[in-house]
Image (cartoon, rainbow, N blue to C red):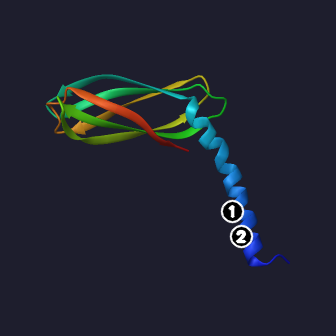
Amino acid sequence: MTPFRSALTVASAACAVLLLPAAASAATLELTPGKVRTDPAGAYVTVAVKNNGADVVAQTQVTCAFFAGKRALGKSSTVLFAIVPGVTGTDQVRMLGASSATRADCAIDGQK
């Protein structure tokens, strides 16, 4: 029978190995944000994330910081699900109450 400590160490090592491919595939996603648009409810930007890798990306979070000139208005995000290789997933990131927004800086925050 394996002692608890060594079984835990083996399990931790297995988890570390399983996480490496996901981290390696982070560079295979290509983010293309659209123009900032406004309406009476606030501001929004359409984001497109293309999967240039060989594996399906289960979840990708995109966060955008909205600005009116140089003044920060806040951040908002969206999650895109199941982007298969060679396909572009799209969604909108909306910031309520940010009708004065003139630009947004968007980035991929994380993926699973």
Nearer the observer, 59 or 102:
102
Q: Secondary structure at mark 1?
A: helix
| Residue identifier under label 1 | 12
Q: Amino acid at mark 2?
A: Leu
Question: Disc number at residue 8?
Answer: 2
Q: Is residue 56 above or below residue 110?
A: above
Identify the residue shown where x is 20% and y is 38%: 72
Nearer the observer, 34 or 106:
106
Where residue 16 appears, as percent x and y from the top left, is 67, 54
Q: Residue 102 appears in which quarter of the rendering? A: top left
Where residue 26 appears, as percent x and y from the top left, is 56, 36
- Left/right of residue 84 with respect to residue 49 in the rendered view: right
Where residue 56 appears, as percent x and y from the top left, is 62, 35
- Left/right of residue 97 with respect to residue 103 in the rendered view: left
Identify the residue shown where x is 24% and y is 27%: 103
Label 1: how many Cα within 10 Å (few below 14, some 14–19, many 20+): few
Where residue 24 appears, as percent x and y from the top left, is 63, 38
Q: Quadrant of the N terminus?
A: bottom right
Question: Disc number at residue 59?
Answer: none
- Left/right of residue 89 with respect to residue 27 in the rendered view: left
Asked if marks 1 and 2 touch (Cβ < 8 Å), the reply is yes
Nearer the observer, 29 or 39:
29
Q: Secondary structure at mark 2?
A: helix
Identify the residue shown where x is 66% and y is 42%: 21
Label 2: how many Cα within 10 Å (few below 14, some 14–19, many 20+): few
Whole-angstrom CA distance, mark 1 to mark 2, is 6 Å
Q: Quadrant of the C terminus?
A: top right
